[in-house]
Amino acid sequence: MKRKIQTMALCLLAGVSLSHAQTFLSQNHAMKRVKTTEKYLLLPVEESEGIAHIRVLKDNRLVKEFNCKLAINKTDYQVPLDLSEFGGDLLLDIQFPGDTRTTGVIRDFACWQEMKVADNFDTTNREKYRPAYHHTPLYGWMNDPNGMFYKDGVWHLYFQYNPYGSQWENMTWGHSTSTDLTHWTYEGEAITPDALGTIFSGCCVVDKANTAGFGKDAVVAFYTSAGASQTQSMAYSTDDGKNFTKYAGNPVITSNMPDFRDPNAFWNDELGQWNLILAAGQQMNIYSSKDLKEWKYESSFGEGYGSHGGVWECPDLLRMGDKWVLVCNINPGGPFGGSATQYFVGTFDGHKFTCDSAPGVTKWMDYGKDHYATVAFDNAPDGRHIVLPWMSNWQYANQVPTRQFRSANGLPRDLGLFTYRGEYYVSVKPSPEVFVSFVAKSSAKLSPAAYLEVTDVKTNASITLSNAKGERVVMTYNGMDETFSMNRDASGLSDFSTDFKCTTVAPTYGAVKAMQIFVDHSSIEAFDADGKMAMTNLVFPSEPYDRIAAKGCKVKIHALK
Ligand code: FRU
């Protein structure tokens, strides 16, 4: 009996069928009228299928268009299309890919039976790999963190978001907020695609002196409009980042370069002007402005410097005392394949960045395989440089074994500088806010979401996390070589990509005495307690690791409060 009631509840959640039939106009073109008072149209998705293009028409006008892998054979999950802003009488014009299909004819596609309307969309977590204390989208795909800023006690995080599937598509800025950098609330879609293109990565600044004329303390966003070319656009918000109005003069920066994106602006106190850095092929371009609208090209940095194994993306330029750190995400070309974050330490005079190191020197911010698109919060208090990574790698991000959502952010980290053998390096420490969520445990049993406090680290030390199935992650510190490594070859599921198995190795720039290791269902982040080493890796154990074996060090387990 109990089972029957549960089944009924699930049917109700899944929505009610649409009364209007669809019209088939060819083997790959259909129209469907949607007349309803319910809030959502639930679209069935099948991830292995091709992308259907959906145009939403209201009174013969195009009001929205997007791509969605509509189910052909079976439904993997549903995504909601919010109808409330259009009113409930719409025509969907749907174009399926290709001229012919091998898997049945259009009228038999699974999507017609399973397209439903409903007033609610259930976002309750259904995934065993969803982290407990890292930011994730409630549903759908996420990549880069975008437009992060702090204002009036609230941390704002926007992100590259696909609301219509759990793989990369339809780039939109999703928005989440937090007051403690750990618990996040989803605020909805902040910036959506328009006639200039989809909305790629970018930044937000708080315009304290109203230099742009949108109002004192207006939040001004810069993003890449990804259309036929990549151009830079702006939008502003006068309600603390909830709603944005796109600037009528967009685009504000253009170029004939194909890879030209990810603008990151900041107020330059010394010169009383704005600067902006963006990725242009395998270089970073720097601009200046007095009013955020007119931008002057100043210089480019990068030729011959650092790693050039891929396209340069998502830059940041951070002042740390007399030095400046230029953050440069690169894909591919990372130290263990795929995407990674390199940086350069040098000086910046508002016009030109000059690197301190020799051109051949490459420095990585994190020596794991799942740390990318890392940039800092604007306007953080006390001069802090707090960054957030996207915790995945373009080699397999679209294939990792989750469905309801794909990808999390890494933990927030505070950046600083240290020197080793005459060179400056960026130090990376988990932000102090992270530790507040944990309490020391008396038992030695590892839980799926834990913080491991590692002390008394000897010259040779190792920590192995494992489960009853023999799946394990082996971390090794070698004080003679000054290296720390993490082997995830036998960590659990890995057959979704031949690029997943690996051992990542980091230089520790001196001895490691203590470490902080964070485990959260499908991720492990290891930090040297002095900030000289960070390593972020995904893992997909078929059941959680519940055992720890430590050699040459002591480990205290802290559980989530
Ligand atoms: C980096 C990136 C950016 C781009 C965005 C698109 O991961 O490729 O360069 O703006 O993702 O989603």
Image (tube, rainbow, N blue to C red):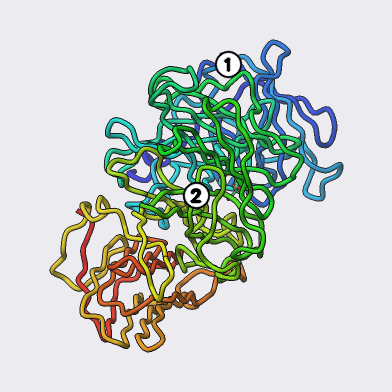
Q: Residue at x 29, y 30 (%)?
A: 152
Is the residue marked by circle 1 packed among few (<14), some (14-19), or many (20+) residues within 10 Å?
A: few
Q: Amino acid at mark 2?
A: Phe
User: Residue 223: horizontal and vertical position, in percent?
Assistant: 57, 35
In this view, the residue in front, 238 or 214, is: 214
The residue that label 2 is drawn on is: 348
Give the left or right position of residue 480, taking residue 493 as reference. Answer: left
x, y percentage for residue 18? 60, 24
Q: Nearer the viewer, residue 322 or 57?
A: 322
Tell me where residue 283 appears, x and y as whole percent: 65, 53
Kind of residue indicated by mark 1: Phe
Question: Closer to the camera: disc 1 or disc 2?
Answer: 2
Q: Position of residue 466 (x, y in %)?
A: 35, 76
Q: Which residue is mark 1?
A: 86
Q: Which residue is painted at 67% across and 52% down in the image?
A: 48
Residue at point 25%, 53% (across, down): 432
Residue 296 or residue 479, whichever sits in front: 296
Asked if residue 8 lies left or right of residue 132, the reply is right
The image quarter in which residue 547 lies: bottom left
Give the quarter of the figure containing the N terminus.
top left
